[in-house]
Image (cartoon, rainbow, N blue to C red):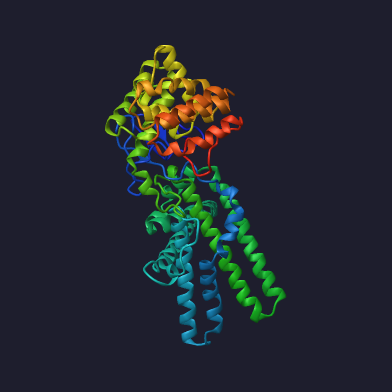
Amino acid sequence: MKHDCHYHPGDPAKWHCGECQMHYCSRCMPDADTRQRRGLCPQCSKAMRYLGAATEVVPFWHRVGAFFRYPFHTDPLIVIAICTLVPILAPANLIGILIWLVLALALFKYTYAVINHTAEGHLKPPAVSVAFTGTGFDIVALQFLVFVLMGGLVFTAGMIGGPLLMMLALAFVVLALPASIMVLAMERSVGAAVNPMNLAMLISRIGAPYFLLYGYLILLTLASGAAQDFAMTHFPLWVSQPLAGFLNSTFTLILFHMLGYLLFQYQEELGFASDLQDGSDGQDNHQRDRSARFDADIDMNLKDGNYDRVQSMLKEALKRDRDNGQRIGQLYQLLTARNDVPELYRYHPRLLAWLADHNDGDGMAALLHSLQNAEPQFRLDDPELAVRCARTLYHRGHFKLALRLLQDFHKRFPDSKQLAQAYLLVAQTLANGLNQWEKATAFLTFIQKRCQQDPLHKQIGTYLEQAQKREPLKGPKASFAVQE
């Protein structure tokens, strides 16, 4: 059965908690260790079972084209070429026979490595070196022994129960042969590969798709035989022999890749977990990010409706890191959605600064209206923040609200270094936004007289000339940030 994440329907589950009976995807478990298959349930803190790619893997009947492309990757092509062409060039003596035998063992070993490699989640073929180095050559002897024991089983059935029982035993052996190959490749155990109960259990756990795959394998075998027969019939021996060998090796790799993929697809039913391995480098560093764990907890609590819990989590986080923009933004969105005006008022300096950083003049206007409705005499106590907010509002067309923030700025903050910028912004708002040129000129004149030490004082003459001509107040090109 394929499961979706409880909190993200449509996303395949990666973890399952047996205590809570909950399924979680990777977004819910960013701090889990997928390599060690260790993760704790966010609800009960109990160890969970890792599902790997069991719930997201594409069914094998949707990947028929990929199966046929598999042998034509570089590594398997090299293996097939070596094992097909070298024996033809080898001398026709004992040395040639030994070379043929060694290469046949290498090809046989590589095909079984394909099953393991695919079942572990690698959809790209194993390297060439797998065929010619390391251990694993004993798989040939093990497979030969399996065939001998299966033949002995059929013969014994015939001796005991006559032709009928022998035919039944033969039918079971033929039907269970793919399952036997898969078990042998994974467990390297002859006993497990010939145990009827073991094979029947594997077939029953996979279910109907096993028989569908069996049909594909029969078709592959028939196609391989027909292709080799065509090659031997229509081409000279020096062409047909390597071509038939190439076709036989190619179809064998396709067959074994399909068997490995069936194990990968039904890993949950078979009791193991593998994940897609190709292209997943660097995932663990992200998964162990504490910030990602916090975001996942926020997301799950929001979906569960635990808004008070989320609000407390964000407030605690801001106690530890007062200026964390991500947490401030999350708190703003939550408080706005809940229309929690008291908390909006409490955190308004940081919320307004965050909105200014994001140039969100519309959100700022809505927040200021809420604060002013709750407190009609509301004013910002920070001159720098007042100028930043007014500038953001000005650029979003909230002219009257921008003017209100800067009202009586020289009286409220007489010693502020922001005075010239504040009143230049007022003049721009009056002239460019409200078409009140006389008032704009008055504020520019005030800056010229009052702020003679401010660097902005040198540019006021240009602004006054623009105001007299009723041109938009933009100032010189190399001017300050308050200018358009």
In-image side of 110 versus 220 (left or right): left
> In the image, residue 273 lies at what x, y percent?
40, 46
Q: Can see residue 148?
A: yes
Residue at the extreme right of the image, as rendered? 234
| Quarter where residue 446 is shown | top left
Relative to 234, residue 5 above or below: above
In-image side of 223 versus 18 (left or right): right
What is the tally of numbered marks visible in this picture? 0
Residue at the extreme front of the image, as rendered? 449
* Residue at the (51%, 54%) spot, across then down: 259
* Residue at the (43%, 20%) spot, across then down: 407
> In the image, residue 441 lies at what x, y percent?
52, 26
Residue at the extreme left of the image, as rendered? 320
Task: Judge by depth and name the residue closer to the eye, 276 or 342.
Answer: 342
Task: Judge by depth and name the residue closer to the eye, 178 or 242.
Answer: 242
Task: Judge by depth and name the residue closer to the eye, 133 or 137.
Answer: 133
> In the image, residue 105 lies at what x, y percent?
45, 72
Task: Judge by depth and name the residue closer to the eye, 195 or 379.
Answer: 379
> In the image, residue 393 lies at what x, y percent?
50, 27
Q: Can see residue 390?
A: no
* Residue at the (32%, 43%) spot, across then down: 38
Relative to 319, residue 282 above or below: below
| Quarter where residue 467 is shown | top right
Relative to 206, residue 346 above or below: above
